[in-house]
Structure formats: structure tokens, C-alpha cells
Image (tube, grey):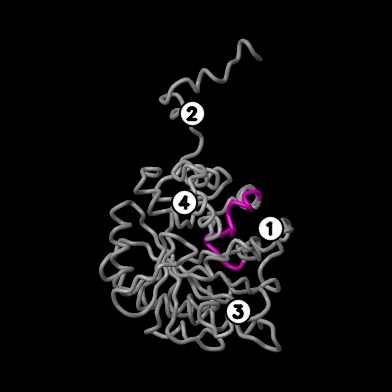
Amino acid sequence: MAFPITRLRRLRSNSITRDMMRETTVSAANLIMPLFAVSGTNIKNPIPSMPGQYQMSIDLIVEKCKHLNSLGIKSVLLFGIPDHKDETGECAAHDHAIIPETIRAIKAQVPEMYVIADVCNCEYTTHGHCGTLVNGDVDNDSTLETLAKQCVAFAKAGVDMVAPSDMMDGRVGRIRKALDDNGFTNLPIMAYSAKYASAFYGPFRDAAESAPKFGDRKTYQMDPANSNEAMREIDLDIIEGADIVMVKPALPYLDIVRRAKDTFNMPLCAYNVSGEYSMVKAAAANGWIDEKRIVSEILLSIRRAGADMIITYHAEEAAQWGIVK
């Protein structure tokens, strides 16, 4: 039936019916908070391009995890900034590297926190690219070996999940084999499956000190113009053993999030990346937007598109503001 018999506004007339009819919700359980770890004690370096975000020493990372846990944020994603870098990123794979040390500290003091470790090389290489360079380009297959070593080191430290973000071909299968060979058959992999070569990563590269010293990452990260290719990337990661697949960035690629969910019906994560966060912060600082409402709308839109979980720098504030429960 059509108007005037059918009036959709009837169910919008008060908050109770609006809540009853709400199709999409966001809870604290859907959110993952990224954290940047550095060595030392009592270090809290502001990230100028990401207001409210910091590089933190392990002791303060632990305190942050305690606070997040009290807010209902039960999962963090760790990125490490080492004291010394090398040509391959293998410095990240030692027992006492920054991420294994951070994992052990969190698990010792906040054992209920679910710790995910990003697995890549860009923070750890002298050149800032995501793998071993051969003739000026990232060599895919030798990089796989470094990634596998990182994952095993993180697993031995007690990590709950590994998240390879490098976009090398075959890395999920190589990591799965390395984990299984070392007795970590139950450790899940969350693959950055459709990671685009995006300008939205700019502030993150300040935070992680990971900007490439030359060139760009277009030979391994995806062309923003491509959707079908994203489905191929996701399909391959699933075949190789990914437990969760990811689309990154989130907001400019909500069509990819929706298509991935409809196509594969796999557990799906979307990364609400640094550039998206920083634009909201800049607009809010200028009084141009209502920050709380904008953040709520952003998180709802990502969930509505099909994401089961969202990596977002807004996680802590969203919980503090009561946007999520």
C-alpha cells in the first residue's frame, strides 16, 4: 500500500519505536583499538597528525589496556616502533623485540585483553618498504620468510591473533604453515586482504615512522580503482587459511566491504584508518561538525556495510562517550 495509508514516519515518531526498528548496532565488542609501542618507560609521544593518539612505552601501553578493558574495549592491535631497523624487518622477530615484549607485558597484567599483532616490515626496515628489497623493488618470496618468523615470535610471546598487512602474495599460507609447524594450530590469522594503496594512510606513517624512503607501495598494495581484484585477493586469502579477512581503508571502500560480505560471508573486519580519523578531528577542532554524532554515524556505516569488527582510533572515545556499550 502507498501513502496515505502507509506512513513510514509512524515508526519514527518516538525514541522507543526508533530503537525497536534499528537494524544496525555497534557495541564495544565490535571495536579494536590500535596502539603504538616504543621502548623505554613513561614515554608518551604525541602524534601531531593524529590528535589524541600517542606512541607509548610498554608500561603505559599496559595501563592503557587496563583502561580500555574497563570501558568494555576488549581487543587491541599492536604496532611497534623499534630502536633499530634493518634491511629486511627481521629485527621484529627476535624474542625481545618491541612487539613480543609488549605482548608479554599485556598478557601478564591484563590477561583478558585480546591482543592482535600487526605483521609487516615497514616499521622495521631502514627503507620503509614492506619487505626485502631486490633491485629496488620488494621481493615477494623472501619477504614471506621474514613475515613467518615474526608471526612465530609473536605467537611464542602469547599473542591471540596475527594480522599480516604487507600484501605479499602467498603470505597467509606461509604464515599458516609456520604457525602450524611450531604448534600454534589454534592461533587465528586476520588478513589485510584488500588493502589499497591509499592516501588515507598519511598520518599513520607519522605514527609508525614507516613512510617509504623512496617510491610508493603501488606494486604490492591495491589500485583504488579495482573491485573485482579485491574479491580475488580475499578469495585467495581464504583458500590459504585466513580466519578473518579485512578491507582497508573503510569509508572510501564501503562498497568493497559490502561486496566482500555478500560474496564470502566470512568474518570481516574494516580498518577506519588514520586519515579518516584525523579529518574528523580537524573538522571537530574547527567547530565544523558534531564529533560525537559523526563518529557514531561512521561506525554505524561501517557495520551496516557488513563489517563484523572495526579497527578504529575512535574506539576509546566512543566507549567513553556512550556511543557504544
Write down the residue under mark 4. Answer: 285
Mark 2 residue type: Met
Disc with the residue nearer the chain's start (3 vs 2): 2
> How far apart are labels 1 and 4 at the CA level?
38 Å
Disc with the residue nearer the chain's start (2 vs 1): 2
Disc with the residue nearer the chain's start (1 vs 3): 3
Write down the residue under mark 2. Answer: 21
Question: Residue placed at 59% from the left, 58% from the top?
Answer: 249
Number of marks drawn? 4
Instruction: Farthest residue to the top: give it.
Output: 5
Write down the residue under mark 1. Answer: 231
Could you say which is closer to the camera, residue 183 or residue 200?
A: 200
Side of 135 where 213 appears, left or right? left
Which of discs 4 and 3 lies nearer the camera? The answer is 4
Which of discs 1 and 3 lies nearer the camera? The answer is 3
Q: In this picture, which residue range is highlighted in magenta?
A: 240-255
Quarter of the image for the N terminus: give it: top right
Write down the residue under mark 3. Answer: 129
Q: What secondary structure is found at the residue carrying circle 2?
A: helix
Mark 3 residue type: His
Q: Indicate yes or no whether the magenta region holds residue 307.
A: no
Q: Local crowd at mark 4 within 10 Å, few (<14), some, or many (≥20)?
A: few
Mark 1 residue type: Met
